[in-house]
Image (cartoon, grey):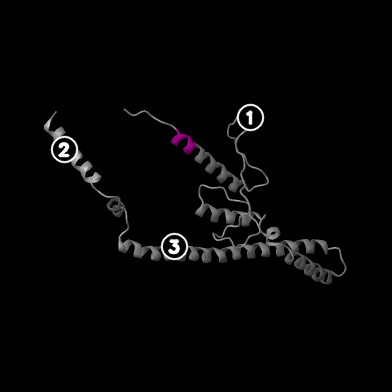
Amino acid sequence: MTKASTNANTSMSAIDEQQQSKTIKEVLADFSLLSYQTDRLPSFLNDYDSVMQNIRQAIAPLDDNVRGLIDLEHQINSQKAIFHDIQQRGDPVGHYNDRWEREMADYQTLQPKKKYYTHENYLKFKQEIWDVHHPEAEMPALGDDEEDDDGDIIVGQTKVSLKCPLTTEWFKDPVSSLFDDTIMARRVERTQALAANASQTGKFYDVE
């Protein structure tokens, strides 16, 4: 045995004896937080809550603006439909006013789910917000709960299968008229990337 090996064995034995001589209380003390660290914990938690509150406050006006644009779009489309309908009528102004009041009254009675949650631009907006906070998760379906803590309206998890049930191969361009193409394309890319990453991390290699 060489001198270097003897010294190494001696050092290891000394470390083992030192560890064995410690009591449980002393071992736990090695992992305990120092006083200045525990003093900073409440401040850290308060800072986190403050940041999350600022994020929610920043998202709220954006959400209101998107909904306002959708409301304005509905008004413009209603006006187009009314103008087209009154072209052949004798009293276009009177008919327009009556029709407009009915259209707006009916629209105001609709729940947010009917007015916004199926609108293409609103879905894009919510998808962008969701991707920031949950880049590796599918966005749940929009629902009726407007007070969710993260600003995301959640009813239940939605999952779209992107593989053929017979061949288990990935579909090519699995888009549908029920979804916006850009949203669906991002879902496909994200799902394929996660599947590829999972297959790589699941492999084992012999290293000699």
Tell whether 85 sits left or right of 192: right
The stretch in magenta equals: 196-202
Q: Which residue is mark 1?
A: 166
Q: Quadrant of the C terminus?
A: top left
Secondary structure at numbered mark 1: loop
Q: Earlier in the sequence, mark 2 or mark 3?
A: 2
- Residue nearest the viewer, comparing 160 with 94: 160
**Count the marks: how many?**
3
From the image, state whether disc 2 or disc 1 is nearer to you: 2
Give the image location of residue 89, x and y in percent: 87, 65
For disc 3, the neighbor class at 10 Å (few under 14, some 14 to 19, many from 20) is few
**What is the CA distance from the residue labelled 3 to the residue labelled 1?**
47 Å
Q: Quadrant of residue 161?
A: top right
Q: Is residue 201 magenta?
A: yes
Q: Which residue is mark 3?
A: 48
Q: Which residue is mark 2?
A: 10
- Check if mark 3's residue and mark 1's residue have beta carbons within 8 Å: no
Give the image location of residue 4, x and y in percent: 14, 34
Q: Quadrant of residue 160?
A: top right
